[in-house]
Amino acid sequence: MIHPYIHLAHISCQLFPLLCSMSQPLINKGFKPLSQLSVFIGVFGASLIAAAIATFIFIYASGLPLTDSEALMQPENIPSMRWLQAISTLFIFGLPAFLFAFICYRNGWVALGFGNAWQWKLAALAIAIMLAAGPLTDALGTLNKAIPLPANLRAYFDGMEKTYESQVKAMLNVSSWQGLFMSILLIAALPSLVEELFFRSTMQGLFMRWWGNPWLAIIFTAFIFSAIHFSWYGFIPRIMLGIVLGVVYYATGNIWYSILMHFFNNAAAVLYLFYLHQQGKEMDMSDTSMFPLWTAAIAFIVLILLMRLLFKVHPPEMQKEIMDNRNDPFANRTVDQPQSDLL
């Protein structure tokens, strides 16, 4: 029988994970890796359906002219478009992450990466790593554009990129302080939160525990993270960013640092566009190179050194998992299986 005070501390860590200083074990309800994958695919599919329904309701209520793409990008429709993107992002990425965590685990907050205490020195290191990744990302973007492609395929990607650019320019048209605040909230903060919960906490965490190889899980998740954005010209740099975010999550065991880095990256783009607008300049997304190519080599060395420092300050470790097979609907189990003291 576990001591009441220890049990109370365990409950407190679930409710207020930032107060806990030790890495907590996951309490698996009994879902084996293939069962977890089935749950993940199932909740993701259900979330896509829910997102479609929520999007339809919002479009009907707001009266957005979806049949007219030019009218859709007019200034009067941009606030509704921002909310529409926020709603779809929340349903597509946020909902499946939460459903998966609390279906498969008794301590769902820990499964989402909220099990370790916040440390300011780790937060500073995370921001430094993101800053160091900037020139490298820029160089990889240039390399991505230089990859030879068949003429028809390049024309297809160019068309997709022009559509994407026009949408980004319209969505990030931050001409007022109110528009800046809404863009930071809906386009920088919310996607950073739910995408990190989906890709790093859920997907990367699932494959790390399944395969037992964190680096393979980090790279695979980064590939999916980049592919799901449907942007060829940003494919390679986004993979690199996904790897950086995944490494920081693996090293710290706390998803807040990856969320902070993701938010920093998104918010910097919004603030840069706000600055351009205040200066009366227009963004040219066809020329995204901001650093000389030689800075990428320096950035790569600095990035490696910062990651080594991160691993020294907070050595990574695979999260422990306690299995309770009684609740797995996909497994053969006995009714009288003893219950763990931690439960």
Image (cartoon, rainbow, N blue to C red):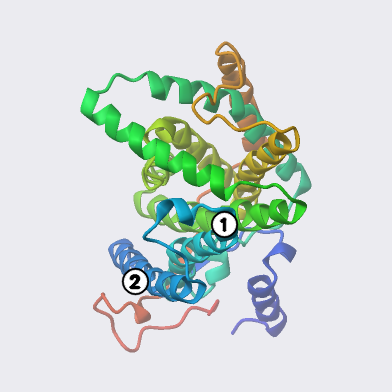
Q: Residue furthest top?
A: 294
Contact flag, marks 1 and 2 (Cβ < 8 Å)? no
Residue 280 position within the rendered picture, expressed as x and y whole percent measured from the top left: 71, 33
Q: Earlier in the sequence, mark 1 or mark 2?
A: 2
- Where residue 205 sits, quadrant-wise, is bottom left
To which quarter of the image does residue 155 belong?
A: top left
Tell me where residue 66 appears, x and y as whole percent: 40, 61
Query: Residue 49 — which label?
Result: 2
Q: Is residue 111 left or right of residue 127?
A: left
Up the image or down, 24 lies above or below 284; here it is: below
Residue 224 versus residue 25 in the image, above or below: above
Q: Residue at x 50, y 52 (%)?
A: 73
- Measured along the vertical axis of the image, is residue 51 above or below residue 212? below
Label 1: which secondary element: helix
> Under tag 2, what secondary structure?
helix
Task: Locate the N terminus by quadrant.
Answer: bottom right
Label 1 – label 2 distance at C-alpha: 24 Å
Q: Amino acid at mark 2?
A: Ile
Question: What kind of residue is marked 1?
Answer: Ile
> What residue is drawn where x is 24% and y is 30%?
153
Q: Residues within 10 Å of mark 1 (few under 14, many from 20)?
A: some
Please report the residue visible at 50 percent of the width from the left and 59 percent of the height from the top. 85
Side of 260 where 247 appears, left or right: left
Comparing 21 with 48, the one in front is: 48
Front-most of residues 7 and 193: 193
Question: As drawn, is 267 to the left or to the right of 329?
Answer: right
Residue with the mark numbered 1: 78
Residue found at the far bottom of this picture: 336
Q: Which mark is residue 105?
A: none
Q: Can residue 92 be seen in this snapshot?
A: yes
Q: Badge 2: few (under 14), some or many (20 or more) residues near its Cα, within 10 Å?
A: some
